[in-house]
């Protein structure tokens, strides 16, 4: 039996669009996807995003960001916690991605946040993914 993972699918869609040097990519909408994409925008990994309403779950159009040389700002996105194996960390064990150059996205009792925000608030949670 296979378990679908909409967050992993979203990360792969963004990663593939980056590698193909696309300007934008449409991903299925959800509250979790919206929170992750909003965080990526706030941290400067994507330009912007827009919600597109349909008669189903909606679509998030993500506008990808390139540097001055035309290279994607996102080098890699890696799903850490999966539906089949959840990875939780205590406030003292929050990972540093590339010694602080990357970003860990944490789902906590206070919402989706970066590793830096979780350390500052002294709370742990589920490690959703790493981005660098």
Image: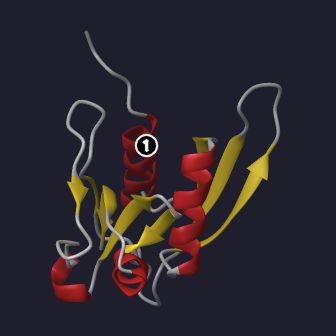
Q: Residue at x 40, y 50 (%)?
A: 11
Classify 64 as above or below 79.
below
Give the percent coordinates (x, y) of residue 95: 19, 73
**Looking at this rendering, what residue extends furthest in the bottom direction?**
68
Give the percent coordinates (x, y) of residue 34: 62, 54
Report the number of numbered marks. Answer: 1
User: In the visual, does 103 lie left or right of 51?
Assistant: left
State the residue in front, 73 or 122: 122
Q: Which residue is mark 1?
A: 7
State the residue in front, 41 or 95: 95
Which quarter of the image is occupied by the C terminus? bottom left
User: In the visual, does 77 lie left or right of 9?
Assistant: left
User: In the visual, does 72 lie left or right of 2?
Assistant: right
User: In the visual, does 115 lie left or right of 94?
Assistant: right
State the residue in front, 31 or 63: 31
Model colouring: secondary structure
Residue 47 position by quadrant: bottom right
**Looking at this rendering, what residue extends furthest in the top direction?**
1
Classed neighbour count for the residue bearing mark 1: other residues with Cα under 10 Å, few (<14), some (14–19), many (≥20): many
Give the percent coordinates (x, y) of residue 61: 67, 52
Classify 58 as above or below 102.
above
| SS class, disc 1 | helix
Q: Residue at x 23, y 72 (%)?
A: 94
Q: Residue at x 46, y 45 (%)?
A: 10
Give the percent coordinates (x, y) of residue 38: 60, 66
Which quarter of the image is occupied by the N terminus? top left
């Amino acid at each position: 039996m296979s378990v679908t993972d909409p967050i992993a699918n979203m990360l792969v869609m963004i990663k593939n669009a980056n590698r193909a040097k696309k300007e934008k990519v449409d991903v299925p909408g959800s509250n979790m996807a919206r929170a992750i994409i909003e965080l990526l925008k706030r941290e400067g990994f994507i330009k912007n995003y827009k919600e597109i309403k349909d008669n189903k779950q909606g679509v998030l159009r993500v506008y990808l960001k390139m540097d001055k040389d035309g290279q994607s700002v996102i080098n890699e996105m890696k799903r850490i916690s999966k539906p089949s194996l959840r990875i939780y960390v205590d406030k003292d064990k929050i990972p540093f991605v590339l010694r602080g150059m990357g970003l860990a996205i944490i789902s906590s009792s206070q919402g989706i946040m970066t590793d830096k925000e979780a350390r500052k608030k002294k709370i742990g949670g589920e490690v959703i993914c790493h981005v660098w």
